[in-house]
Amino acid sequence: MRRPNLTTSTIAIAIGGLLTLGIMSESAFANWQTDDLRQGLPGRRISGGSRSPSTACLTTPNQPVIALIPEENVGLTLSEHPTFWFSLPAVSNDRELEFGLFDETGEVVYQKTFEASGKAGITHLSLPETTTALETDTAYRWYLSVVCDPESRAEDLFVTGWIERIQPGNEMRQQLATATSQERLALYEESALWYDALTTLAELRQNNPTAIDLTQRWSKLLESVSLAQAISAPLNSPIENTSL
């Protein structure tokens, strides 16, 4: 792992300003089995609109970036290399996206810059298997930025949140070993494993795009964390896994 570079430091300063917000709210998801969930961590689920006068980084101006995470800004996972989900506006394909993940000491675990696709919709990014596995019982902070102006990072459209990996109990481990995708989804939901539940449900929808029950379940899940504005966004390809 390496120390944050200048770009990371710039983002960290901007993210640090959120510490004064003291965000904490209730949601249906937060009311599940969340004894180990660190509630109320500072973050930003929905970016502001571009402050650039020309809004040149967006094909359709004044549309936010939305992180698909609970209202408490933190979610649990069992995965060593989890997947992160976002609803993006149509970002001009001559702009870049930047993702970073930090451990509790501020060390960079993963950081990449990607080309924007130019398409609006739900997209995702999975940590590569070559990246250091997330440790258990450790809160990691991540951000995703749309870099509107490389010379003025204050113009970035960014979201940020937290993720924590936990170990499953013996009973859950045994259940997961033989579970179908639908059964795994139910187990993840029952245990408030947000990142795993969302990823499993998104994969089920991608494999069964006409399944009404999965569409309804997707709507219910996003509504449970007050993200109804992202329900109708189409499921797009993942963020390109190629750094610039």
Image (tube, rainbow, N blue to C red):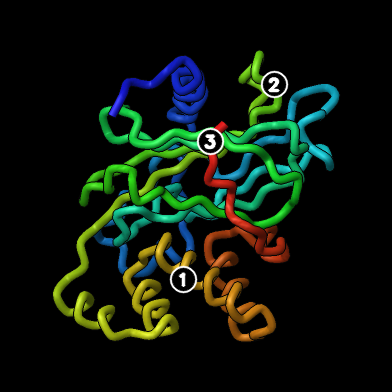
The answer to which image quadrant residue 60 occupies is top right
The answer to which image quadrant residue 132 occupies is top left
Mark 2 and mark 3 lie on one chain; the one further toward the N terminus is 2
| Callout 2 secondary element | loop
Q: Relative to 49, does residue 54 appear above or below in the rendering?
A: above
Say what amino acid the circle numbered 3 marks. Ser
Residue drawn where x is 47% and y is 20% of the image: 13
The answer to which image quadrant residue 93 occupies is top right
Compared across the picture, whether 177 is left or right of 50 comes to left
Say what amino acid the circle numbered 2 marks. Asp
Is residue 39 at least partly visible in the picture? no
- Which mark is drawn over residue 101? none
- Which mark is drawn over residue 243? 3
| C-beta proximity under 8 Å, tags 2 and 3 | no
| Callout 3 secondary element | loop
Compared across the picture, whether 148 is left or right of 20 comes to right
Q: CA distance from mark 2 to mark 3?
A: 18 Å
- Where residue 119 appears, x then y in whole percent? 75, 50
Residue drawn where x is 28% and y is 85% of the image: 178
Front of the two marks 1 and 3: 3
Quickly name the residue at label 1: 200
Quickly name the residue at label 2: 149
| Callout 1 secondary element | helix
Depth check: 114 or 171 in front?
A: 114
Q: Relative to 166, does residue 160 appear above or below in the rendering?
A: above
- Where residue 106 appears, x then y in whole percent? 32, 27
Mark 1 and mark 3 lie on one chain; the one further toward the N terminus is 1
Q: CA distance from mark 2 to mark 1?
A: 35 Å
Say what amino acid the circle numbered 1 marks. Thr
- Where residue 169 appears, x then y in whole percent? 17, 71
